[in-house]
Amino acid sequence: MTSVRVPITTASRKGVSGLVAASEEQRVVLTSHGRPVAVVDSADRIDEDMRKIREAKLAILDAAADLASNRTRKFNLAEVCVRLGVDESRVRALAAERVANQ
C-alpha cells in the first residue's frame, strides 16, 4: 500500500475535495514540519484494513485457545527445520557455539 506525504500548507491549497480525490488513489499522510500529523484515506481501504485486523484478532484468539487447551501439535527440531528449509546440523552447531560462549 503506497502513501503520499503532503505538507499541511499544500493540502490547504488543494482543499478538501482535492484531498478526497487524492485519497481514492492512495493514502494521504498530512505532515507538519516533515512529521506525520494526520491521514486521509478512502472508506473502502479503511473497511478492508479493519476486516484484516478482525481476522487477525480471531486467528490470534484461536491460537491462544489452542495453546491454553494443549491442542497444538508439537514439532521437534528436525520437523521445524524441514518446514523452514533450514539445515538442522547448522542450527545445532550454532546452538552449541552459543552455549560454549556463555
Image (tube, rainbow, N blue to C red):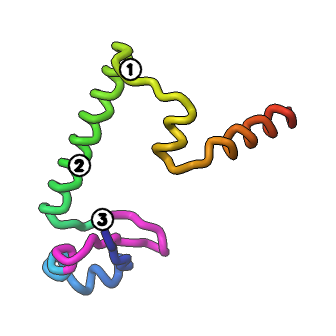
Q: Amino acid at mark 2?
A: Lys
Helix or strand or loop: what does disc 3 sit on?
strand
* Residue interval drawn in magenta: 22-38
* Nearest the eye: 47 or 19: 47
Name the N-terminal-most of marks 3 and 2. 3
* Nearest the eye: 26 or 91: 91
| Residue at mark 1 | 67
Q: In this image, 77 relative to 8: left or right?
A: right
Q: Is residue 4 above or below residue 88?
A: below
Crowd class of label 1 (few under 14; some 14 to 19; many from 20; radius 10 Å): few
Q: CA distance from mark 1 to mark 2?
A: 22 Å
Q: Amino acid at mark 3?
A: Val
Foreground mark, 3 or 2? Answer: 2
Name the N-terminal-most of marks 3 and 1. 3
Residue at 27%, 80% (x, y): give it.
Answer: 12
Position in image of residue 27 (x %, y %): 27, 70
Q: CA distance from mark 3 to mark 1?
A: 38 Å
As drawn, the label of residue 39 is: 3
Name the N-terminal-most of marks 1 and 2. 2
Residue at 35%, 81% (x, y): give it.
Answer: 9
